[in-house]
Amino acid sequence: MMKRNIAILLVLTLLATCIAGNSDAQFWKRKSKRRHAKNATDQNNQQADSTQTKLTKHERKAEKKKEKKDRKKQKHELKHERKENKKKLANEKKHPHVQVVAAPVTVVRQKQEIQYPQSQLKTRYRVDVLASLYLDDFAKNGSTAYTDRIPGKAMPGISFYEGLNIAADSLKKAGFSFDIYVHDVASSTESVAMLIKSGTLDATDLIIGALQTQDVPMIAGYAKKKQVNFISALSASDAGVKDNEYYTILQPTMKTYCQWIAGDIKQKFTGMNVTLLCRTSSSADETVFNYLINDTAVKVNYKQLLCNAMPSKDNLASLFDTTKSNIVVVAVLDTKYADSLLKQLSQSFPATHFEVYGMPSWSGIGSLRKEGVFPNLTVRVPMPFNIDQTGGVGKYVARMYKEDYGGKAPEMAYRGFEAMFWYANLLKHYGTIFNLKYEDNSSAPFTRFDIKPEWDNEGNFLFYENKHVFLSKYENGVYGVE
């Protein structure tokens, strides 16, 4: 029994040994497999690290190349900026009164839509004309035919009325049906405030005003309220009126004149230096100056010289190249001071030619029409109207004026005739709301009016304005129109 037990024990021991041997074999087999897998993984990782290392080196090389290029560019820009600053400082030191001014860029937003009521076509229209006639001041002197008895302040209004009256007679002969009422707004009983308060204008179909700027806002507000058109035929100012689709400025504003000057310079003298002589001692001149340098429609870089006092020859000499023609804009409305500036310019540099742009008021400078006064200047002056007195209509107005009032017809008489004649035709053909038909200027006797809506930078409607400008030219006393 004991031997049997010993035999069983030996068999179990041998079996356990076999099992243990198999286990060890499996263990080492698995261990070997893990070692081979680890070696493969390590090899793959090494290859990946090698590839990554190569890629990183390539990227770093490209990055360093880019950084080097950027540093070179920055160095070049910095060098250019220092050069420009140095040049600017040297120029300012050399020309302490001169500044180069560039116009800013303004973004105009979408424009609002203009809406009107239905236009009324009538068989007979009423037109109310408002003008400063000052009848109370000279009525005792008798007929307006004796113009030497009329106060000077009354002449524009009187002349405008006389031309308008000639137009009314010719329209009547042509079969037009109009009732025309003329109001002397210089009279206390017919002031703008009294006309509105009394309801005198309530039945009107059109208001034409040869008014001073201060009278414009009140009548423009009334016109908007009554939805009737108001034409400002005399003042070149917008008078601060905004958001009024019934308000039309027949004479271009100073802003429009400045835009025309800049546009003409760009067209005729592209790339040439432009000098701006300006004044800030006059509020009117300062306004012109601001329009010129802040013009967003046409950019012109100006070399600016402040002329609150008459500039010396040395101050002027620092601005010009005396070996060639120079472009000069003179932003001075006062005709006496402007005349002195032109003489200083012409006499200081007699061998140099100047292309000068002036202001609308310069048509009153008599020396521009005299030979030999400015032999080296070509002076351009923007004008609102160019009345052709040699044509058929011009001769008709001149003849009727002489018959009715005596003497030679002044410019305001032609302007009164044209305003009445053109707007009477607009009323007849398009009714009381003719604003969207402004492109029809075929019946205007002298001027090809270009009436356009004006907008602010926010896209808000302001008013209508005539954008057509004539450019007169004076060369050694000879007058012409471009």
Image (cartoon, helix red, strand yellow):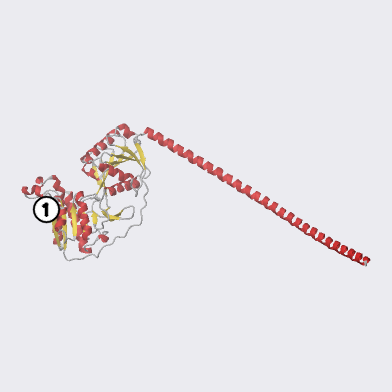
Q: Residue placed farthest to the front in the image?
A: 1
Residue 168, image x, y percentages: 14, 58
Name the foreground residue: 130 vs 269. Answer: 130
Q: Quadrant of the N terminus?
A: bottom right
Residue 205, image x, y percentages: 18, 61
Residue 156, image x, y percentages: 16, 48
Would residue 54 appear left or right of 194 to someone viewing this image? right
Residue 455, image x, y percentages: 31, 54
> For the point 19% across and 59% down, which residue is it?
206
Three-letter code, disc 1: Thr
> Which residue is the site of mark 1?
189
**Residue 77 can be seen in this image:** yes
SS at badge 1: loop
Name the foreground residue: 33 vs 247. Answer: 33
**Residue 392 can be seen in this image:** no
Name the foreground residue: 26 vs 185. Answer: 26
- Give the crowd class for mark 1: few <14, some 14-19, many >=20 residues within 10 Å: few
Would residue 256 appear left or right of 366 to someone viewing this image? right
